[in-house]
Image (cartoon, grey):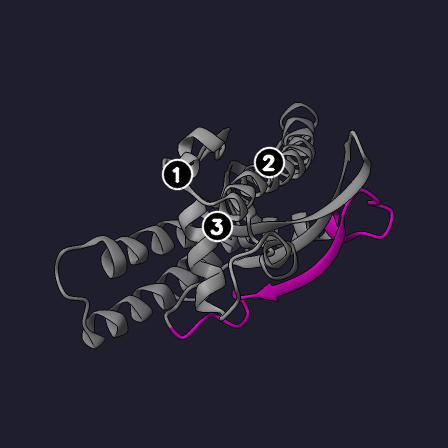
Amino acid sequence: MMIEKSGSIRLKDISVAGNLPPEQQALAAGMVRVTHLYRSALKVAVTQMEILDEEFARMYDHSPIHHIEYRIKSLDSIVDKLKRRGFEVSIDNIYAHIQDLAGIRVICNYLDDIYYLRSLLTRSEFESFEVIREVDYIKNPKPSGYRSLHLVVNVPIVISEGTMVLPVEIQLRTIAMDMWASLEHELRYKSERQFTDDDAARLRLCSDAISEIDQEMQDIYQGKEPRYHA
């Protein structure tokens, strides 16, 4: 199952573009081209993930892929990220400093599925993508309790001017990790109630418990003896 989280950025979506000075109009038009190019790279990467998903579904008893989500960063998110990092908002800085403009989230059933997919995507004979960054927040969770495996891969695309290579971020996580991350984001950033240090501590405990559940579900799937007895 493929779920797209956001649509393209179009020049007409930038409501003030017609009222901007020429240099700002050029920047707005450049933003549209950037997102088009990254959307093209995203399509290539998503297609490869879809090929793997269909192969597992048709040829094997178990697919490591539960579902796949993908998105292009919004214009506001792009601008905010550059400003937070102290960079001028420019097309050159987007290419140089943002590696997650195009993103894929692969939700897996079990822990081992994550690392199996990683092995497929990073094997030397898999020439389509080059892994340029990897961060394992499963083995080394963030202080908040966030767990996921992040890969940034270079994806080649063919355009009218030739071949271009752009980064696409791929996040691999279990169903349980994705549930925690979604609700943590909702509680921390979307809820009207004040998020406290006690809330953060409780969410970290929930994350630790979910990690135990993931391992236990993995053991059940593999037919291993339970680590804990009632």
- The part of the chain drawn in magenta is 120-143
- Dot 2 corresponds to which residue? 39
Q: CA distance from mark 2 to mark 3?
A: 25 Å
Residue appearing at x 43%, y 29% in the figure: 12
Horizontal and vertical percent for residue 70?
51, 39
- Dot 1 corresponds to which residue? 19
Q: Earlier in the sequence, mark 2 or mark 3?
A: 2
Q: Earlier in the sequence, mark 3 or mark 1?
A: 1
Q: Nearer the viewer, mark 3 or mark 1?
A: 1
Left or right relative to 60: residue 146: left
Residue appearing at x 84%, y 45% in the figure: 127
Residue 86 is covered by the magenta coloring:
no
Residue appearing at x 48%, y 45% in the figure: 73
Q: In this view of the protein, which residue sits in the foreground, 148 or 84?
A: 84
Check residue 174 in the rendering and tell me which mark sits there, or answer none.
3
Quarter of the image for residue 65 reads top right
Q: CA distance from mark 2 to mark 1?
A: 27 Å
- Describe the element under mark 1 as helix, strand or loop: helix
Q: Residue pushed farthest left? A: 193
- Describe the element under mark 2 as helix, strand or loop: helix
Q: In this view of the protein, which residue sits in the foreground, 25 or 79?
A: 25
Horizontal and vertical percent for residue 90?
56, 55
